[in-house]
Amino acid sequence: MVNVSLFSQITSLLPRDLFRSIVKKHESDKYNKGIDSWTHLISMLFCQFGQANSVRDISNGLRSITGNIHHLGCRQAPSKSSVSYVNEHRTSKVFQEFYYTLYDYIRQQAAFARPALKQIKRKVYLLDASVIPLTLSLYDWAQFRKRKGAMKINLVLDYDGCLPAFADLTKGKSHEVTVARKMKFPPGCVLVFDMGYYDFSWWNNLDSGGVFFVTRAKTNLDYEVIEEYDLTKEKDKGITQSCLIKLCGPKASVDYPQKLRLVRKWDEEKQQELVFLTNNLSWTASTIARVYKERWNIESFFKIIKQNLKIKSFVGTSENSVQIQIWTALITILLLTYLKVKAKYQWHMSNMITFIRMNLFVKINLWSWLDEPFIRQDERKPEQLLLFSG
């Protein structure tokens, strides 16, 4: 008989000693006037798992489990004023640093496989950004347009497991290339990004650092073909051109003086031509096209967190509270991905999130339920079947 809820069992997976060291480093409990940092974390995780729409929902939800609050490691359920206060005043850096600590910790606990590209032994990263619209009248610090507010999530997704290896939360006005320029990538890795990162000088820095990149070419790209590649051995019959090029134009040729590989592919499904650019001159054209195709995984990641977690509406209006909610959403997706990888049942992420939410405070064994969530028809008791017989 299990005496603790699914939510308690999930939060028990968090390395609390590592969280304490981060709390001590930032002294986030030193002048604590409300709830401590751990209770704050649990409250915001409940906001994500339980789809709480306000601090009142968080407070009432945790108060409703009465004595079971101690199973979560909390002394008492927080009041709505306490949650609101700490969201505004406790630094979001505690949650940001804990995300990266948890990321490293979970990586040691489970093996995360890549969806495809098994033939590429190099580390692959997917880079993109997504805008979260905000109401300017409530979030006046996040001005994006004249009458619109926004926050931007900049992510570098590790293709092995498709989890954020790096995240940066900026105001909507900041350009994604500005954030990308500050990032450091290990030599020999492969970076995949879309046309939002069109900056030849940044590409040159990546090339100088030994980083391979794959991206899309703009229609107005000015270049000179140096050498055409033979396409007879290409497995992908949609490849129409593969060539070595050099950028033209006074600025482009200075910003990126090296040679590039250009690949054209006809997409039969979308009935359009796709043109790829890369600084990897040895891959086949088919491989380059497949590498860029995997960029959809980061689009899928953004879709999952936006549809299933609380990052489109917020329980607080300050910049700090919005950042805390986004970081706890990323912590939540880390936990969920770990559960999905370890479970024997082949869960779809959105289904697993929904079913966990439905059973959040049910007292059943977490791993037994994840491995076999549904009772089979042939396992019903005879008396259950007799109830509906003739």
Image (cartoon, rainbow, N blue to C red):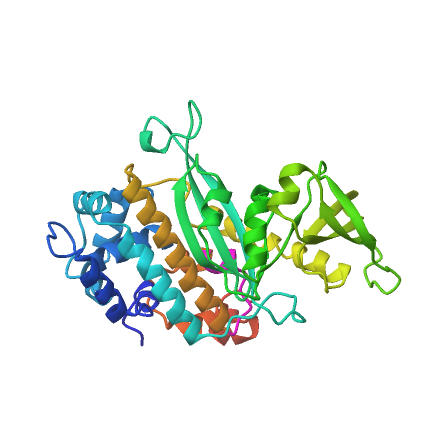
Q: Where is residue 51 in the image (x, y as percent from the top left)?
A: 37, 48
Residue 285 position, x and y percent, is 76, 59
Q: Residue 166 sits in which quadrant?
A: bottom left
Q: In this view, does 283 lie to the left or right of 100?
A: right
Where is residue 74 shown, x and y percent of the image? 19, 62
Residue in the image at 32% along x and 50% along y: 47
Q: Give the range drawn in magenta.
A: 344-353
Task: From the viewer's side, name the closer residue of 8 and 172.
Answer: 172
Q: Can residue 52 be seen in this view?
A: no
| The quadrant where residue 289 appears | bottom right
Total residue callouts: 0
* Residue 188 in the figure: left or right of residue 31: right
Residue 126 visible (yes or no) = yes
Residue 218 appears left or right of 209: right
Q: Find the residue positioned furthest to the right.
A: 232
- Percent position of residue 243, x then y: 79, 53
Asked if the stretch drawn in magenta spans residue 89, the answer is no
Residue situated in front as seen by the camera: 293 or 57? 293
Q: Residue at 28% of width from left, 40% of height from top?
A: 316
Q: Quadrant of the C terminus?
A: bottom right
Q: In this view, does 121 lie above or below 228?
A: below
**Where the N terminus falls, by quadrant?**
bottom left
Magenta-colored stretch includes residue 350: yes
Q: Which residue is drawn at 30% across and 66% down?
A: 8
